[in-house]
Image (spheres, rainbow, N blue to C red):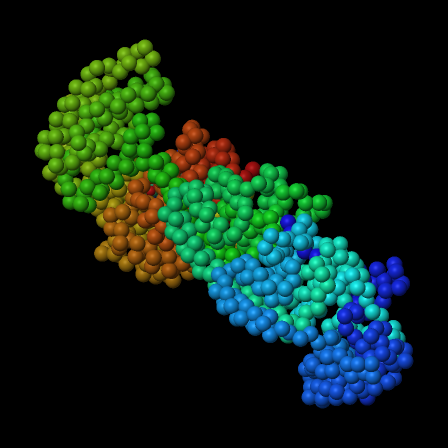
Amino acid sequence: MLSVPLQTGTADDPAADMAAEADPAPRPGVQPHGWLLVLDDGYRVLQAGCNLAELCGVAVPAAIGRTAEALLGRPAAAALEAAVEDSAGGSITPVQTRVETPGGGLNVHLQAHWGAGGLIVEIEPWQMLDLGVASGFLSAFGTAIRRYHAAPDVLSLARAAARDARILTGFDMAAVIRFDAEERPELIAQDAEPGTDPFAGRTVMPGIFPDELRAIYTLTRLRLVSDTEAPMVPLHPPANPATGLPLDLSRAWLRGLTPLLHDHNRRAGVRGVLSISLVVGGRLWGLVACYNRRPRIVAPPVRALCEAMGEIVAAQIGALAERAVANDRVAAARALARLSQSLRASTDLARTLWEERQRLAVLFDHEALDLRIGGDERTDGAASAATRDALLTALRNRALDGVVAVADCRLLLDAGAAPEDWPGAALFMELPHAGHLLLTRGRRGPWSAAKQEAAHELHRLLAERGAELYRASAEERLHRLAYFDPVTELPNRAHMLRDIQAALAEDRHPALLVASLDRFRTLKGSLGDDLADRLLAAVARRLAGCLGEGDLLARVDTGEFAVLVPEESGADAATRLGSRIREALRTPVALDGRDLFVTASLGLVPAAGPQALPQEMLRNAEIAAFEAEASGGGTKAFEGAMRARLTERYDLYDQLRHAVYFGQGLTLAYQPIVNLADCGIAGFEVLARWNHPERGPVPPSDFIPIAEETGLIVPLGNQILVQACRQIARWRRMAPQRDLYLSVNLSPYQLDGAKLDLPRWVQGVLEMTGAKSDWLKLEVTESGLIGNAAKSVDVLHRLRRLGIGLAIDDFGTGYSSLSYLQRLPLEALKIDRSFITEMDRSEQGAEVVRTILQLARILDLSVVAEGVESRSHLERLRALGCARGQGYLFSKPVDSQAAEQIVCGREPWIS
Ligand code: C2E
Ligand code: CA
Ligand code: CA
């Protein structure tokens, strides 16, 4: 490292005072190469340096009280008076004049300023500048300025300045010292005569420029010490007679260093020191310091040039700094744009950030990086794990808005010393799921505004993209869970229905073949679940081997498979597939050393048939397979006549119509919906009940489809709504303190605007019954929304605007896409009972419920679990954070009287 003997020295430097106390002889004085006088406003001497006799032959104290003219002669006194008068209270221009004394004369440079103690006059011998040397200076100066303007950065500017300062002054060495963000001196450039480095081997002493000293350097921009070894000349009298205090020499040219710093420089071998302040934007940015092994007096014109050079270098530093800030911003914006592009395209944020760490470094200029995203941890830096963990904990506690910029990491420590690898400054971004991005550097100091803005922007990008990816992965997991059968890994019923739907929507006419394993339920009972599942998997593999191109195989029920055969495969492709399947099943399946024979009955819906609904097509194929099995196996194609065997449905229809229009036998049951946290009542689901005059109770799963097929659902649904609204209005009056609601099932047919303007009608019912819109919720199944999507969605939005909460019923069993659901104005989703039941049986079941709850959180939906039948269901759902539930554990659907008891605070399930 290079050596810089640092010049300093003020009269009130504490170091100087200490030295003065240790040795009473040296007093604050002036350098011996010049003379100092303090005059009153009549130009009479108040105080003078003790070397005065060398100038004018009159020693102190004899000189005190005499006039300047008497001591210095007429020309010098006149020049001084003229300069003072010209100044009119401002700064006094230095003059060249001649001191004339009886003993001879001396050309001098005379400079004066007003201080608290009087007019301080400083006189130095005038040095003639050799003309050649002077023009050399001037042309060097001209080139220097041009070079400064061309300097690309601060370091090359500093190198040029050091070189020029050395040449200009003729000193042995010049250095540029910069104060860093914490005002510590830092040597950034030096120049010595080629082949010599007179002051090698010493370092910059930190702390050598205290605040007061830097303040003085900011005020007076040039200082010269001609000889560090020359003893200072004391003043006589020591105290200023005008103020009674030691004279304030802070603006005096001749003022020297403190004894301590004289010593410091001497030990470095320095005799002459010239230092030029570099003041940028009012702050002392640094110094150009020139050092010489021999004593040096620098002629005033050269000093003036040095001062001008300092100004120009400082101005250029300012311009470069501004340009650097602007460049930084442009580079940051560019790096950020690229980074954002990569992140948006990325599916693995940790890896992308890692690969882009060069770009990050352009943005943040950090030295170490540590990141953790979604369990992926990467680190690029020297800190130990202990340090990193302590740092992360401290930062996390401060991350209010997710980003923390720390200028000095020592402040993060509660107590005790910082570990060796503790960084200087840190930039921390908190990411979801306990992730983070931590950038550190060894150097302390604030992060620029541009870097902090970039950090916020990057944080926002990461959070956004992270959420997107998280949602996509959850969606994909749910998709697998919802559309595939874990036993055979084939698509499931919902998948098949969706594919039929897609084919029909494109006006293609696929054929459908259902293969139902004969008496499978019985077989399953005797084999046990495990073996039965393995049998199914084996059968699935055989069936898969029979498929033609474009065929889709799915497992659509316990022992039932279906194949969708595209139209392009030809008219009898499905029939031929049927033969292949029967052929394939002829060989027994070997499992656990047993040969198992399975046969299948096949039901076929040929391609030509116009099928309105996927459900209907699948059901028709199943009916045909059922007929085939009933008639002893083989294959049957579906015919209308098979439906005719279901004529009893039509009887039912007749009776249902009667019931609807004459209000006979239709009632409502209410099933409590419970807040899982405390098992308190939240509301009721309204369920239709039909008590048939001859058959007794008919389950809704029988009569609702009939009502839907025949259009009866509209008047039926209307009646249910009116009755439900009356009921809730009454219950809210009875228990105003409870936030009860009723959840009414809505059939997709009721959303069909051609039959009914539902929102308008609902509004009328609310007005008529005095029920409020937020007491009423409506449930729709997702499959119900698929057919006439656009129109239903519009109706749903209008209902939502009325203030009615909408829930998706039987969630997970339908076959709508999540992105589609996201567009619906939903408030809640009800997890289908089958998933709750499955939760206790398999990991997969529990996983579905967990995933649905995660999704609900992402989509900001509340959740009701259906079919809560056991304590264990309740505990699991609570643990997963599910808010509400309904099911036999709490209560079966009950009639209105029993429900009223519950409303009045008798919740039988709470013992
Ligand atoms: P859903 O809307 O899913 O209704 C829940 C069904 O699950 C009800 O059957 C209820 O009694 C039953 N359930 C409730 N908790 C449990 C439990 O813990 N375990 C078991 N095993 N079952 C439970 P329900 O009343 O037979 O209704 C069947 C379906 O009929 C309903 O399914 C709904 O889709 C339809 N439905 C019922 N009432 C109406 C109505 O007023 N309008 C319309 N459009 N459809 C209705
Ligand atoms: Ca329901
Ligand atoms: Ca349901």
Residue 366: in sight, yes or no?
A: yes
- At x 79% / y 86%, what residue is drawn? 73
In the image, is residue 737 above or below residue 307? above
Q: Is residue 807 left or right of residue 889?
A: left
Viewer-proximal residue among 260 and 790: 260
Q: Quadrant of the C terminus?
A: top right
**Image location (x, y in percent) of residue 419:** 66, 42
- At x 25% / y 36%, what residue is drawn? 496
- At x 72% / y 83%, what residue is drawn? 97
Counting every numbered tag in the picture gives 0
Q: Is residue 706 left or right of residue 442?
A: left
| Residue found at the far left of this picture | 571
| Residue found at the far top of this picture | 593
Viewer-proximal residue among 756 and 843: 843
> Looking at the rendering, which quadrant does residue 521 occupy?
top left
Q: Is residue 281 left or right of residue 834?
A: right
In the image, is residue 500 above or below residue 295? above
> Looking at the rendering, which quadrant does residue 72 occupy?
bottom right
- At x 71% / y 78%, what residue is drawn? 109
Residue 780: in sight, yes or no?
A: no
In the image, is residue 750 above or below residue 97? above
Q: Is residue 607 left or right of residue 738?
A: left
**Image location (x, y in percent) of residue 154:** 54, 60
**Image location (x, y in percent) of residue 220:** 68, 71
Viewer-proximal residue among 500 and 628: 500
**Image location (x, y in percent) of residue 95:** 69, 82
